[in-house]
Image (cartoon, grey):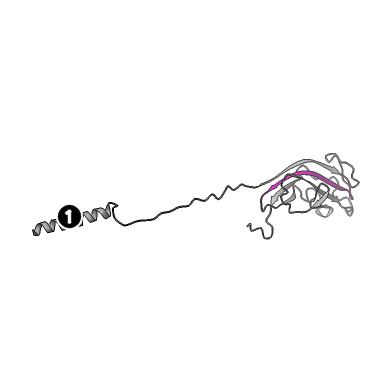
Amino acid sequence: MKNSTLIKGSAAIALGAALLLGGGGTLANWNASAAQTPGIIVAGDLNVVNGVGAWTDRNGDPVTISAYKVVPGDLLTFTQDLNVTLAGDKMAAEIATSGITATNGFTPANVTVSAPVLTVAGDPVSNPLTPTGETQTVTATITFEFKSSTSDRADVSATYNFNNVGFTLTQVNTAGDGLS
């Protein structure tokens, strides 16, 4: 009888262990999940397309720059329409000149180059530009003044290469935009 009790006890322990290990026990791991649809992010846009530029003299008369010979006191103005696209919640951009140095062939004291003056539909605007929801035409104007104070024969026959005159549009950070 002793063996029978021992066998029954061993069988009960083995059955209990099998039930616990085999998933029939009371040990439970709960699990739950929730799906979220945060949406899709879309990148903004920054682009500039140059229109045809035009040169004028101090009187507003058209100038063919490749044939024009400047003299002290001349003021040449370059005007160009720029199709500007800006899109982005925190987008801001500046238009600046490119390909211009005051000393590109002339004595620096004898030539001044202005910063670009910007207008939209004839109304003045200033840097930085911000999105308007559509492509806008910005007219950019820069002036080259050949100073009347040029003395003696300074810069006679000097050349200034205007072939690389252009405008660039560059994204900038503004105060409080949280961009680095």
> Picture coordinates of residue 38 (x, y %)?
55, 50
Quarter occupied by the N terminus? bottom left
Q: Farthest left residue?
A: 1
- Is 120 displayed left or right of 91 in the figure? right
> Picture coordinates of residue 30 (x, y %)?
39, 55
Quarter occupied by the C terminus? bottom right
> Picture coordinates of residue 3 (x, y %)?
9, 57
**Can see residue 123?**
yes
**Can see residue 158?**
no
Q: Farthest right residue?
A: 59
- Is 79 displayed left or right of 135 in the figure? right
Q: Which residue is at the front of the view, 162 or 19? A: 19
> Is residue 164 located in the magenta-colored stretch of the structure?
no
Q: Which residue is at the front of the view, 65 or 150? A: 65
Give the amino acid at mark 1: Ala
Q: Specify the quadrant of the image occupied by residue 179.
A: bottom right
> Is residue 73 located in the magenta-colored stretch of the structure?
yes
Say what secondary structure mark 1 lies in.
helix
Q: Which residues are magenta?
A: 68-89
Give the residue pinned by disc 1. 11
